[in-house]
Image (spheres, helix red, strand yellow):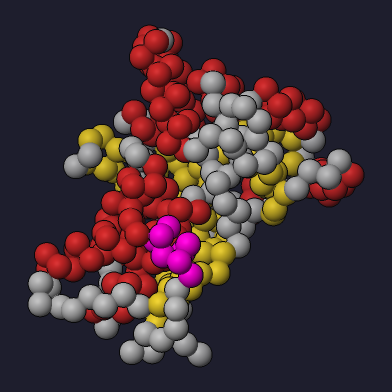
Amino acid sequence: MPSITYKAPAKVILSGEHAVVYGKPALIIGLGKYIVVTVCESGDSDPQLLEGSKPVIEAVHNYLQKKYPEKELKLPTITVQNDIPLGRGLGSSAAFAAALSGALLHYYLGEEPSKDTINSLAYIAEKHFHGTPSGADNTTCCYGGLIFFRKEFEFLKTISALHAKLPEIIESKLLLIDTGKPEESTMEMVKQVRIFYNANPLKTDEILNKMEKTTKRLVVSVIKEDVNGFCDSLKKNQSMLEELGVVSPRVSQIIEKLQEFGVGKITGAGGKANGSGFILFYAYDKDKTIRYLNNNIIPFIEFTQDFNGVQYQKSS
């Protein structure tokens, strides 16, 4: 069989980090940064890559062994290209799980699998990577676009693909500012919020309820192309994340210093000790903001939407 290549996008949580673990909604969007996975019969896989791929390979093999017990599952060679910053809240593990699941399924079955199947297997792999993920990351990496996601129970998730895109008036002013890779893993940050919840249940419920309202307001601001509403929601979301204790003091100071240039919030699980991953930042004057970031040697990337999710890359 010829080589099979799949690519999957990164994701950005616009609103609802951590709250989504507790049955609250999150608004997430596909980001135009990608992991590309190729599988083929010949060659050797990098041993370290194979080790990191085990949860995905096991999920795919278990699925196929149940459905096609007679099928021989000889492992192909796996290669990866990636332009998603790792460990910074942009869903690199979910994108990898989606792209590799798609490529392996296609390789073994000889046809494109459904995105629903890819998403289910990527979620199983994500549980190995992160412990108790909501499923929001892999869902966005699989479907792309704007996703309104709510996990009621393990067996009941509401996934609404909004038939809209981030309006150009908002997208054109967005940057992702890199505060550095968190010292804590996503799993550790989710656990820390759980500890905070157990110690402060009433306060945490109040924060999560406010975050749900903010997420819904953000949806409305996107649909109505309401820049002021969008910025206000980002600001409120950041305040709540700080209350949950998932933003380091250094990153809070960075966001405070950037207030003259616009409004921002961390996106992803965050980090308490030093870096907190990326800040999703709406710049009032993008050129002026970029000059400031360059002058202060603060890395950033420009924001572009992905509408396609995981995709089979046909050979040209």
Vertical placement of 199 versus 297: above or below?
above
Name the residue rendered at 34%, 39% in the picture: 131
- In the image, 24: left or right of 249? left
- In the image, 23: left or right of 242? left
Q: Nearer the viewer, residue 281 or 190?
A: 190
Give the main secondary structure of the magenta stretch: helix
What are the residue bounds of the magenta stretch? 46-53
Asked whether the viewer can see residue 215, the reply is no
Query: Where is residue 204 shown, x and y percent of the image?
Result: 42, 16
- Name the quadrant containing residue 251: top right
Vertical placement of 58 versus 138: above or below?
below
Vertical placement of 309 versus 180: above or below?
below
Query: Where is residue 239 shown, x and y percent of the image?
Result: 59, 22
Asked whether the viewer can see residue 148, the reply is yes
Name the residue rendered at 47%, 45% in the picture: 28
The reply to whether the magenta stretch includes residue 51 is yes
Q: From this viewpoint, which residue is outermost toward the front? A: 47
- Name the quadrant containing residue 100: bottom left
Name the residue rendered at 58%, 22% in the picture: 242
- In the image, 227: left or right of 3? right
Number of numbered markers: 0
Query: Where is residue 79 shown, x and y percent of the image?
Result: 48, 73
- In the image, 124: left or right of 27? left
Q: Nearer the viewer, residue 196 or 175?
A: 196
Name the residue rendered at 35%, 69% in the picture: 102
Quadrant where the N terminus lies? Answer: bottom left
Query: Where is residue 266 shown, x and y percent of the image?
Result: 60, 35
The reply to whether the magenta stretch includes residue 131 is no
Vertical placement of 311 versus 22: above or below?
below
Q: From this viewpoint, which residue is outermost toward the right? A: 295
